[in-house]
Image: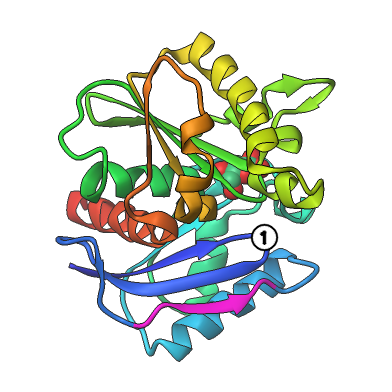
């Protein structure tokens, strides 16, 4: 089926029409700036603009950077605090006039990697990490998602570890790839102690540059870069929506 996949991020709102059978984009990938402040009303307006520009009428799947339970946002670590408690699905449905399903952005990226990328056929425990402004995490076992895992919230030096090891921190603090990898290793070590995954897939924008850091990573699990790179959020959100339409 064809679904419009949208990935809402702190700096950009990206979307493309996805063939959920193949996981491929079948339209151009459009990116609009996330409005600042990124209030629910402003973001909903940008999402509506994206839908209009892609001339889309149909199901929409949307990845959102917060805990999402039954379409409602329950956290706001790297987004406007006004999102907490908002029924994101209803808000975007009203703004676009289309049926909308919303999923945590890292869960979306994980769904894409498991269905179309490095996790295909994996029944072992697979941890997908998205490294960007924050740290997103998604855990699969026997191919099933355990939703809303928030490893980026793990406390480290009195703050969530995403403030120490996210990809954005490397740039903000002008760290070398090696120095940042050391921080990432600290995070991997904590995650492994809790979950003992067999495979770790590193996604997010930084996965495009995996050759710069992957050899520095130390983990008991096998560690590979994401195959869908930063398209994973769009593709996974579309796939999530297609599945719920098929289930009825
Ligand atoms: C949020 C997660 C999100 C991650 C990546 C974190 O700050 O708490 O829900 O998946 O950023 O965007």
The furthest residue to the right = 158
Front-most of 139 and 119? 119
Tell me where residue 97 sits by quadrant: bottom left
Front-most of 145 and 245? 145
Ligand 1 lies in quarter: top right
Q: Give the range drawn in magenta.
A: 28-34
Position above or below: 19 against 110: below
Report the residue at 24% width, 31% height from top.
143
Residue 122: where, in percent of width, then height?
20, 30
Residue ID for mark 1: 10
**Left or right: 43 in relation to 223:** right
Residue 59: where, in percent of width, then height?
32, 69
Front-most of 185 and 162? 185
Q: Is residue 32 magenta?
A: yes
The color scheme shown is: rainbow
**SS label for mark 1:** loop
The N terminus, quarter of image: bottom left
Report the residue at 33% width, 19% height from top.
198
What is the crowding at mark 1: few (fewer than 14 residues within 10 Å), some, or many (at least 20)?
some
Report the residue at 36% width, 84% height from top.
56
Q: Ligand 1 near label 1 (Cβ, under 8 Å)?
A: yes
Observer able to see residue 227:
yes
Residue 12: where, in percent of width, then height?
61, 69
Q: How many labels does the image show?
A: 1
**Left or right: 116 in relation to 161:** left
Q: Does the magenta stretch include residue 13?
A: no
Residue 30: where, in percent of width, then height?
47, 80
The furthest residue to the top = 193
């Amino acid at each position: 089926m064809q679904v419009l996949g949208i990935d809402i991020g702190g700096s950009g709102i990206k979307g493309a029409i996805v063939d959920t059978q193949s996981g491929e984009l079948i339209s151009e990938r459009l990116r609009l700036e996330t409005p600042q402040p990124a209030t629910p009303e402003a973001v909903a307006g940008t999402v509506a603009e994206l839908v209009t520009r892609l001339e889309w009428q149909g199901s929409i799947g949307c990845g959102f950077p917060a805990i999402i339970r039954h379409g409602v946002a329950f956290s706001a670590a790297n987004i406007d605090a006004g999102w907490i408690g908002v029924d994101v699905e209803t808000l975007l449905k009203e703004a676009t006039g289309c049926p909308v399903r919303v999923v945590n952005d890292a869960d979306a990226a994980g769904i894409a990697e498991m269905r179309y990328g490095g996790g295909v056929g994996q029944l072992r425990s697979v941890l997908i990490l998205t490294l960007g402004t924050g740290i997103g995490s998604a855990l699969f076992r026997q191919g099933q998602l355990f939703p809303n895992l928030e490893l980026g919230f793990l406390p480290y030096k009195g703050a969530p570890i995403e403030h120490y090891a996210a990809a954005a921190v490397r740039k903000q603090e002008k760290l070398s790839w090696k120095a940042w990898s050391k921080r990432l290793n600290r995070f991997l070590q904590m995650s492994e102690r809790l979950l003992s995954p067999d495979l770790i897939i590193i996604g997010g924008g930084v996965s495009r540059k995996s050759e710069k850091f992957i050899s520095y990573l130390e983990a008991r699990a096998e560690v590979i870069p994401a195959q869908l790179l930063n398209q994973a959020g769009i593709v996974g959100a579309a796939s999530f929506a297609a599945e719920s339409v098929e289930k009825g």
